[in-house]
Amino acid sequence: MSKNYHFSTKLIKETVGVDPQTGSANVPVYLSSTFHQKDFDHFGKYDYTRSGNPTREALEDAIASLEGGVRGFAFASGMAAISTAFLLLSAGDHAIVPKNVYGGTFRILTQVLGRFGIEHTFVDTTRPDAIEEAIRPNTKVIYVETPSNPTLRVTDIRAVVRLAKAHRCWTFVDNTFMTPVFQKPLEFGADLVLHSATKFISGHSDVVAGLAVAGSKAIADRLYFLQNALGAVLGVQDSWLLLRGLKTLDVRIRKSADSARRIAGFFAAQPDVRHVFYPGLPEHSGFALQAEQATSGGAVLSFELENEECARIFVNHVQLPVFAVSLGAVESILSYPPRMSHAELNEEEREKAGIGSGLLRLSVGLEDAEDLIQDFSNALGCVRTQRQVTVRGEE
């Protein structure tokens, strides 16, 4: 394939494969757990679906090409991908992780991997000096989420990679929020890219999946061994659904990101909103860095109201978004991180991570931006009215 193709063209070329036997324009769904071998001494490419399946392989090849990596891997969930990646470490090894890391990653580090002697330190990865101070002789991985969930803080991938290479450790980047449409960490020297493919890559709230892309054959071989040994593979039907979702990723996430930028601007102008977290706004502390390493602020933003009571009122009065965990779907999804994505953190840990009691996260879908803004304006009006009633009652 020509390297001169634009991303949207490459996306279609990588996800649409003509079956040589039938001419089918879609990758066949190979619902087979096992594969016939032609003779006693020579086995074919596929023998057992845990070890390899043509449908899953088509998805894995597509994400590897789109991220610019050596090999892709499809896992049963985003956490299966992340957990398997951390199992590249051994007892006595140390990982540096963002202090506001996703709750599921926090759980695997603090409650599982620690029992096997894998150590970790939580730091503010937006500060390269803090990362460097945390590096130990046994540090093997610097793990990055950028922009972070849910406060959308931006980490300098190039700076992290420089530190990692200087100290002979790996850089793992969770690219869920940006996807390869907007950001390609491997181009900056990262060793492994991870996705909760449940989110934007699927895009339809109907698949739970994880993806990983290795930047070198050495990591790819080790990751494949672990995936096969653990059996943490994505099912065939879900692989096909994810491949289908991937076909429309470019147009979906660009539309959502354009709406997110407009909605973030709306919230920033509202007196009832204490703070807006969106790296596509010029006033965001990571705006310049985001523009250097990504081509958009993305389709997710967070905004902080005065307290949990205000957040409750807001959620109870919006009409369009689904109030749920997860993100990245065609429908807008509103969530409350203190009790959803970051419920594993205690109150003190959430406060240190900047996750206040009035924080709401919004994943912008494909609804018309003006309709969403009107809905949010109405809900903020309800917040204002009920707060005024409360204040008068207290007086």
Image (cartoon, rainbow, N blue to C red):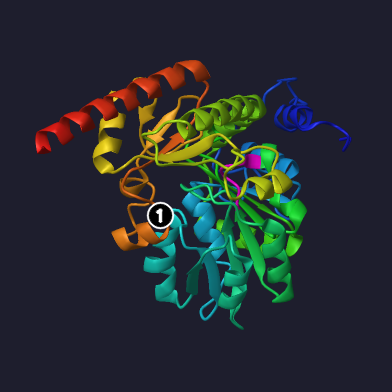
Task: Determine the residue located farthest toward the bottom in the rendered image.
Answer: 137
> With respect to residue 4, does 291 lie above or below?
below
> With respect to residue 214, does 22 lie above or below?
above
Q: Main secondary structure of the magenta part?
A: loop
Tell me where residue 245 appears, x and y as whole percent: 58, 29
- Left or right relative to 376: residue 41: right
Does the magenta segment cover residue 101? Answer: no
Name the element at disc 1. helix
Can residue 42 be seen by looking at this rendering?
no
Residue 200 sits in quarter: top right
Please name the residue shown 87% across and 38% down the image: 3
Residue 165 sits in quarter: bottom right
Give the residue number, with chain letter if any, for mark 1: 103
> With respect to residue 304, does 131 lie above or below?
below
Tell me where residue 221 appears, x and y as whole percent: 69, 61
How many marks are shown on the rendered structure? Answer: 1
Please name the residue shown 53% across and 60% down the image: 84
Magenta residues (range): 174-179
Does the magenta segment cover residue 178? Answer: yes
Could you tell me which quadrant the C terminus lies in? top left
In this view, the residue in front, 313 or 111, is 313
In this view, the residue in front, 162 or 14, is 162
In this view, the residue in front, 271 or 61, is 271
Tell me where residue 333 appears, x and y as whole percent: 42, 31
- Left or right relative to 211: residue 43: right
Task: Determine the residue located farthest toward the front in the rendered image.
Answer: 395
Could you tell me which quadrant the N terminus lies in? top right
